[in-house]
Image: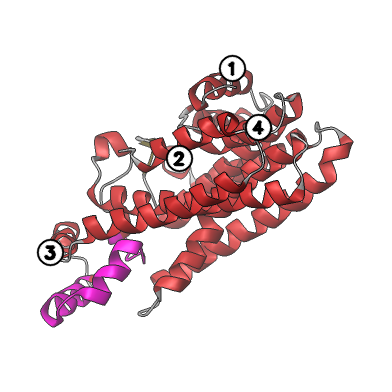
Amino acid sequence: MYSFQELSIQFNQGFEAPRFPTSPATLYEPGEYFLNIGGKRIRPVLCLLGNELFSELSQDAFHLAGAVELFHNFTLVHDDMMDEASLRRGKETVHIKYDASTALLVGDVMLIRAYEYLQRIQPQHLSAILQLFNQTAKEVCEGQQLDMDYSKMDNVSMEDYIQMITLKTSVLLAASLEMGAIVGGAGKGNRSHLYEFGKNIGIAFQIQDDYLDAFGDAAIFGKEPGGDIKQNKKTFLLLHTLAVANPAQKEQLNILLNSNPADKVEQVLQIFTDCGVGDWAENLKAQYLQKAFEHLEAIAVVSTRKEPLIALANYLMNRNQ
């Protein structure tokens, strides 16, 4: 059994070779630039962990992991454009460093390349993987659209937000694990529990991400501080604050949401703090983490095979970037 860190090294060694042709350089160099920014590459390694939970690592799992990483980066390039973000992982986003048209095509070609990686998988696994991959890709797009829709709406329920996060973030984490399990020969029951483990970890991950976007150190987190606040994004923190704020706080918050003073981020963060969002977010994150571990416990494999997933979940929930 390998740890997340060991699998990450193995994946990166295989994925660092040029992922694109050389010409036209105006398209493929920006693609390599974005992929070389790096990141933790959690999703592709989840494919490997899902495989190894049930059997020895297969080359198919590495093909799958490459496809997932390319798909994820496709979504990031396009998300950065929609969010008008200038930084990703502390580096200039593609549409800022190059231009918007190039960024659009870079994302497109990453998606196409992802399917080329999937074509390398053995035929006995490919049908089930494609079905799950395509369903997940559609759901991720649905989640992104809901995220944009909610930013323009005055009232969004916590239930609606959780559903949006499930689509935008959690399903790809869950599907990465389940697709790895398919390669590993897992049965449907075990695959379902593993998917639910990943989905609940994904929601907890997003709670942490929302918190770090507001309160994280930009030098460590690699994003502009308060990006969600500047865009009036409905986040776990904002929805909870709107629900518990006193009338004066709610009035001030609504004024800030409908204006853009120079100190908007600082003012909103103060209201968040006054409303105790830190402890609340930590408790909610723990609830989803507990649900995830219940599903992991239900998977019918020896407990030692689950240890890398437990370690990864605990790491993700205590990260600061």
Dot 1 and dot 4 residues touching (CB under 8 Å): no
**Percent position of residue 160, x then y:** 47, 72
Label drawn at residue 66: 4
The span from disc 1 to disc 4 (Cα, nearest Å) is 11 Å
Dot 3 or dot 2: first in sequence order is 3
Q: As drawn, is 109 to the left or to the right of 84?
A: right
Visible residue check, residue 182: yes
**Percent position of residue 133, x then y:** 71, 49
Front tag of 3 and 1: 3
Q: State the SS at label 3.
A: helix
Give the residues in magenta: 229-256
Q: State the SS at label 1.
A: helix
Q: Amino acid at mark 3?
A: Asp
What residue do we see at 33% from left, 43% from top? 223
Q: Amino acid at mark 1?
A: Gln
Q: Amino acid at mark 4?
A: Gly
